Image (spheres, coloured by chain):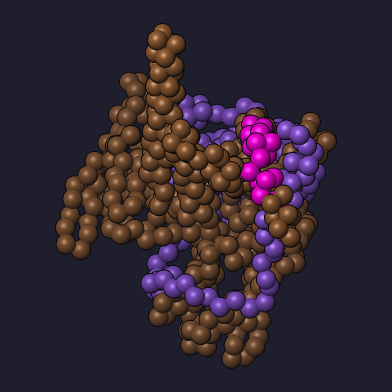
């Protein structure tokens, strides 16, 4: 290779020529159609859940992804919420390892056998695994919070999956363990 | 002008360019292999191998800008076409080499067709259920369903609308305009409470929090802010739209009810698949699957066919391939209904690697055969 620098510069120049421009803004007409309809009856038939709120849990309004939110304790540092996602939501093992990663345990994922050996609690007619992970929580806000605990469970119902998750200071979460299990059991 | 073009062609056809491209591809493969341990396969595939350019951080501190594998392979195609065939000596003695280079071009072309036009997704069925559509793991779509039909916006039209970038979508049959902004590939909607002060625009008492990309494509759940502008009243209402939400966004426009959902992108199959029976065998004393297979019926307008899909024995028909990928629920009890998940692939260039390698093999066989004959002929001459 007589001129390696010239060759390398040529590669970069070719790349810049190939680089695509940004997509235009403005109004775009939707052209793709699909044979689906919205019907109020179909919306009413969609699954709704009921539960018994444990004593001391304050219910907050449902949001786009959470069918119910609770804050626990006067300081509002501990929360519990239920999320319903279509399909498997990625599966039990993947989500438990995602929670472990949120608690700083990404280097110690659980395999299928270890997930199977987690304690089971009753929920929505099934025995579902209960994940209890203590560590440094780096989920939602920018600041990592040490001394936190995540307690969570997942129930796959086929067309949808139900996630129940409680996060807060470790001592507070441990104190609410039995109420968490009772809440999961009350979901219908 | 002609001289510039000639210089440009000589550069594109040069052996030096070929060496640089191969070294860079080797470097990308090396760096990407280590990086996927931290970032996951999906993120590294997009960043290192599906991109034009990337920045690799050495030790997390020093930036190293590099061309992506997509760019390198496009240049490699041009280099082989110009140098391996365009500038190469032509003659029967070079026939084998020319055939082999043609095979390499076919291989690279097949890779490009696969990258641009292949469609991959999953199809999950419970026993007794049937479906004629499959869903992507990493592509999304906004589906607007009205009283007489639906409209679909694929994510290539809105996934770049991050931060303050926005775009308005309209249709003749749609009684409102939909403006999408603030899209993020992995999000969650968080209610504004004392424990979680808002970190973004607040809509309906919640905000959209951007999360780091998941290691696997399936972990990512996107979200965006949408503004609905009624065409009749010109009133605008804002909402948060998140993927896989259990309840759709319901919009009333005049006398029409519309639902808006952000779903995984789906495509139709040319046939319907019904899962008749899913069979799994577990290793004794464990819940770890040893083998699992699905007995399905492929239903078309005029016929039905029973097919068994198992590991290494996919269903192939009309350009689609259905592989046995997984099953569940993972917390299934002994009498629970099971579902089977098939990986579905439609790849127009599915057989290109086989054809390309065959052409390369023929080319090398021809070349080495000619070399052998020439050597033997020289040996005979020397003896004489």
Main secondary structure found in the magenta portion:
helix
- Region of the chain picked out in magenta, as a range: B8-26
Q: Height in image: A39 above or below B288?
A: below
Q: Is residue A103 visible?
A: no
Q: Residue furthest right?
A: B62
Front residue (pair B58, B252): B58
Q: Quadrant of residue B293?
A: top left
**x%, y% of residue A188?**
44, 53
Q: Is residue B97 left or right of residue B71?
A: left
- The image quadrant that residue B209 belongs to is bottom right
Q: How many marks?
A: 0
Whether residue B7 is visible:
yes
Q: Position of residue B366 (x, y in %)?
A: 40, 30
Above or below: residue A96 compared with residue B253: above
Query: Does B37 sit left or right of A137 as displayed?
Result: left
Q: Residue at x 40, y 16 (%)?
A: B376
Residue drawn at (40%, 10%) of the image: B384
- Between A184 and B155, the residue placed more toward the observer is B155
Image x and y of residue B349, in percent:
41, 48
- Residue furthest left in the image: B303
Viewer-side residue, A107 vs B80: B80
Which chain: brown?
B
B10 drawn magenta: yes
Residue B71 sits above or below residue A24 on the image? above
From the viewer's perspective, is B72 left or right of B173?
right
Q: Which chain is purple?
A: A
Residue B116 on image: x %, y %: 51, 54
């Amino acid at each position: 290779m007589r001129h390696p620098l010239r060759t390398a510069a040529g590669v970069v120049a070719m790349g810049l020529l190939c680089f695509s421009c940004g997509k235009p803004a403005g109004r775009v007409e939707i052209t793709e159609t699909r044979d689906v309809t919205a019907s109020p009856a179909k919306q009413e038939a969609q699954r709704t859940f009921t539960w018994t709120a444990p004593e001391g849990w304050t219910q907050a309004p449902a949001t786009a992804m959470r069918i119910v939110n609770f804050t626990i304790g006067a300081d509002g540092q501990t929360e519990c919420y239920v999320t319903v996602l279509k399909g498997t939501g990625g599966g039990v093992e993947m989500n438990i390892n995602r929670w472990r990663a949120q608690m700083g345990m990404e280097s110690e994922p659980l395999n299928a056998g270890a997930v199977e050996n987690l304690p089971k609690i009753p929920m929505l007619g099934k025995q579902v695994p209960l994940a209890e992970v203590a560590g440094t929580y780096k989920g939602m806000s920018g600041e990592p919070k040490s001394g936190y605990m995540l307690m969570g469970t997942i129930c796959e119902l086929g067309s949808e999956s139900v996630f129940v998750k409680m996060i807060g200071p470790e001592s507070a979460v441990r104190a609410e363990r039995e109420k968490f299990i009772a809440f999961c059991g009350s979901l219908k | 002008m002609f001289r510039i073009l000639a210089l440009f062609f000589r550069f594109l056809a040069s052996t030096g360019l070929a060496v640089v491209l191969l070294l860079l591809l080797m470097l990308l493969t090396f760096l990407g292999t280590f990086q996927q341990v931290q970032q996951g396969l999906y993120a590294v595939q997009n960043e290192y191998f599906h991109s034009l350019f990337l920045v690799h951080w050495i030790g997390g501190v020093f930036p190293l800008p590099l061309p992506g594998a997509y760019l390198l392979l496009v240049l490699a195609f041009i280099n082989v076409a110009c140098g391996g065939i365009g500038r190469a000596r032509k003659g029967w003695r070079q026939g084998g080499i020319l055939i082999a280079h043609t095979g390499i071009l076919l291989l690279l072309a097949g890779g490009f067709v696969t990258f641009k036009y292949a469609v991959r997704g999953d199809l999950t069925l419970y026993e007794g259920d049937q479906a004629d559509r499959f869903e992507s793991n990493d592509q999304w779509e906004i589906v607007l369903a009205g009283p007489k039909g639906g409209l679909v916006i694929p994510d290539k039209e809105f996934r770049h609308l991050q931060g303050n970038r926005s775009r308005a979508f309209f249709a003749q049959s749609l009684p409102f305009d939909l403006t999408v902004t603030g899209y993020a590939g992995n999000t969650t909607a968080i209610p504004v409470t004392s424990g979680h002060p808002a970190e973004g625009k607040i809509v309906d008492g919640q905000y959209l929090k951007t999360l780091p990309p998941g290691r696997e494509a399936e972990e990512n759940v996107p979200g965006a802010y949408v503004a609905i502008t009624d065409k009749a009243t010109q009133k605008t209402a804002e909402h948060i739209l998140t993927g896989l939400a259990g309840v759709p966004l319901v919009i009333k426009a005049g006398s029409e009810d519309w639902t808006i959902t952000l779903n995984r992108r789906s495509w139709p199959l040319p046939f319907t698949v019904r899962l008749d029976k899913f069979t799994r065998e577990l290793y004794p004393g464990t819940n770890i699957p040893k083998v699992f297979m699905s007995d399905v019926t492929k239903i078309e307008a005029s016929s039905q066919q029973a097919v068994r899909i198992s590991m290494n024995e996919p269903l192939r028909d009309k350009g689609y391939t259905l592989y046995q990928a997984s099953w569940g629920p993972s917390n299934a009890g002994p009498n629970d209904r099971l579902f089977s998940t098939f990986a579905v692939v439609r790849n127009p260039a599915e057989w290109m690697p086989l054809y390309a390698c065959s052409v390369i093999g023929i080319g090398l066989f021809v070349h080495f055969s000619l070399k052998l004959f020439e050597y033997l002929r020289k040996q005979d001459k020397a003896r004489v």
